[in-house]
C-alpha cells in the first residue's frame, strides 16, 4: 500500500509539474562505450578479447555449466518464450481464494464470458 503522503490529493511531496528527480538518471562514465569497445577489440595473437571471453564461456557450457549455456543461448537466440494457459484461470483463482458457500463458486462460473467462436 502506498504511503499516505504519496497518494495524489493527500499531502503530495511535490507540486504538480515538479519532478521528484530533477537531476534525472545518473550519466554513464564519460567515454565508457568507447572504452569497452577498445578493450573488447584488443587483439593478442590475432584474437580479440571478446572472442577469448566467448570461447571461455562456450568451453564452460560444453563442460556442463548450465548457467554458461543459458547465457550463450539467451544472448544468441533470445530468451525462450513461455506460453501461459489462462483457460482455467478462473478456477485457479477460485482455488486460491475458496468461498465457503457452494453457490458463490457457481456464480463465478456463470459470470464467465462465453468461449470464443471458431
Image (cartoon, grey):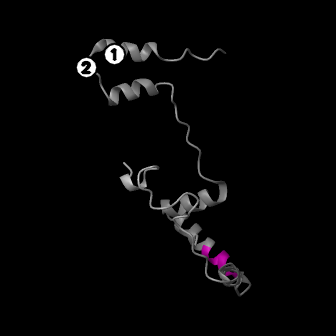
Residue 50 locus on image (x, y percent)? 66, 76
- Above-or-below relation of 84 to 1: above
- Residue 50 included in the magenta stretch of the image: yes
Q: Which of 83 and 45 is in front in this view?
A: 83
Q: Residues within 10 Å of mark 1 (few under 14, many from 20)?
A: few
Picture quarter containing residue 3?
A: bottom left
Q: Nearer the viewer, residue 65 or 101?
A: 101
Q: Mark 1 points at which residue?
A: 104
Determine the secondary structure under disc 2: loop
Q: Which of 101 and 67 is in front in this view?
A: 101
**Disc 1, disc 2: CB below 8 Å?**
yes
Q: Residue 100 carries which label?
A: 2
Residue furthest to the right in view is 46
Q: Gap in Å between the C-alphas at discs 1 and 2?
A: 8 Å
Residue at image coords 27%, 16%: 101
59 horizontally vs 107: left or right: right
Q: How crowded is mark 2: few (under 14 residues within 10 Å), some or many (20 or more)?
A: few
- Above-or-below relation of 43 to 6: below
Residue at image coords 35%, 17%: 105
Part of the protein shown in magenta: 48-53
- Above-or-below relation of 26 to 102: below
Determine the secondary structure under disc 1: helix
Amino acid at each position: 500500500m502506498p504511503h499516505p503522503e504519496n497518494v495524489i490529493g493527500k499531502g503530495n511531496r511535490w507540486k504538480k509539474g515538479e519532478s521528484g528527480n530533477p537531476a534525472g538518471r545518473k550519466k554513464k562514465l564519460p567515454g565508457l562505450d568507447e572504452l569497452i569497445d577498445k578493450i573488447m577489440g584488443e587483439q593478442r595473437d590475432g584474437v580479440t578479447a571478446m572472442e577469448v571471453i566467448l570461447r571461455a564461456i562456450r568451453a564452460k557450457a560444453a563442460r556442463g555449466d548450465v548457467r554458461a549455456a543459458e547465457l550463450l543461448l539467451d544472448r544468441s537466440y533470445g530468451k525462450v518464450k513461455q506460453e501461459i494457459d489462462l483457460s482455467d484461470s478462473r478456477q485457479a483463482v477460485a482455488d486460491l481464494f475458496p468461498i465457503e458457500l457452494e453457490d458463490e463458486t457457481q456464480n463465478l462460473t456463470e459470470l464467465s464470458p462465453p468461449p470464443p467462436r471458431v
